[in-house]
């Protein structure tokens, strides 16, 4: 049940990230047209785009992990015995969980500081609050670490003769 919930949450966050990316395209086009045709760019576009890129990246991380879309190099591992493939796969999951957990832990204080101090980014036309992006980083990295741990547990419970998971094919969807 936890696996299904995290898959649903990963898909929901992916939909939010895709919608945000879609809307950013319109903002950038409006800014370019405003600059070229009307000699008047959309104010605050650089601030909004830089803020949105961080948010989009960390909202997509849990889905990339659950779907097997993270970097996976099998040039060496496919030549190894099945047990060695399994050990390396588990080590990769644990290292991924550790990496994202450390990033999550390291992001807590800056996020709380941004919230408490009402920190903003940008000068002039538009000032964007920093705390939403910082809390999205915490959410994304927490879910990424959690998904790596879930994959590790699923892999430990899988039959020993099952080959390493590897990346999903482009047409494969989450179960």
Image (spheres, rainbow, N blue to C red):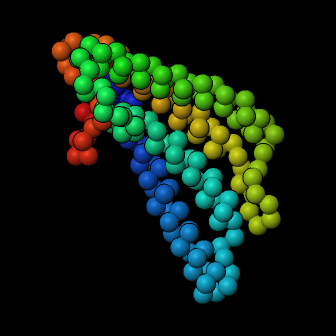
Q: Say which of 13 and 161 sits in front.
A: 161
Question: Does residue 154 appear to the left or right of 71 in the view shown?
Answer: left
Q: Position of residue 46 (x, y in %)?
A: 66, 63
Q: Position of residue 139 (x, y in %)?
A: 55, 34
Question: Does residue 162 appear to the left or right of 141 in the view shown?
Answer: left
Q: Is residue 60 visible?
A: yes
Residue at 72 percent of width and 49 percent of height: 129
Please tell me in which quadrant of the rendered image residue 107 appears: top right
Of all residues, the one furthest to the bottom in this rendering is 37
Q: Is residue 150 visible?
A: no
Which quarter of the rendering shows the C terminus? top left
Which quarter of the rendering shows the N terminus? top left
Please tell me in which quadrant of the rendered image residue 156 appears: top left
Q: Where is 69 relative to 129, above or below?
A: above
Q: Say which of 80 and 67 sits in front.
A: 80
Of all residues, the one furthest to the left in this rendering is 161
Residue at 44 percent of width and 35 percent of height: 62
Q: Position of residue 71 (x, y in %)?
A: 40, 37
Question: Does residue 163 appear to the left or right of 124 in the view shown?
Answer: left
Residue at 41 percent of width and 49 percent of height: 15
Q: Where is 52 relative to 137, above or below?
A: below
Number of marks present in the image shown: 0
Q: Say which of 144 and 83 sits in front.
A: 83
Residue at 24 percent of width and 42 percent of height: 169
Please tell me in which quadrant of the rendered image residue 72 appears: top left
Q: Where is 77 relative to 159, above or below?
A: below
Q: Position of residue 151 (x, y in %)?
A: 36, 23
């Amino acid at each position: 049940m936890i696996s299904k919930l995290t898959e649903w949450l990963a898909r929901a966050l992916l939909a939010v990230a895709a919608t945000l990316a879609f809307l950013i395209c319109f903002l950038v086009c409006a800014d370019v047209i405003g600059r070229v045709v009307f000699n008047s760019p959309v104010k605050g576009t650089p601030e909004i785009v830089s803020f949105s890129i961080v948010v989009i990246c960390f909202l997509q991380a849990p889905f990339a992990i659950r779907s097997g879309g993270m970097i996976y190099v099998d040039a060496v591992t496919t030549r190894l015995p099945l047990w060695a493939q399994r050990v390396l796969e588990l080590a990769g999951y644990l290292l991924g969980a550790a990496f994202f957990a450390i990033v999550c832990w390291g992001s807590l204080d800056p996020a709380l500081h941004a919230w408490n101090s009402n920190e903003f980014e940008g000068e002039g036309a538009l000032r964007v609050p920093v705390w939403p992006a910082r809390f999205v980083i915490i959410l994304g990295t927490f879910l990424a670490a959690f998904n790596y741990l879930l994959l590790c547990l699923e892999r430990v419970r899988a039959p020993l003769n099952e080959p390493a998971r590897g990346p999903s094919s482009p047409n494969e969807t989450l179960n």
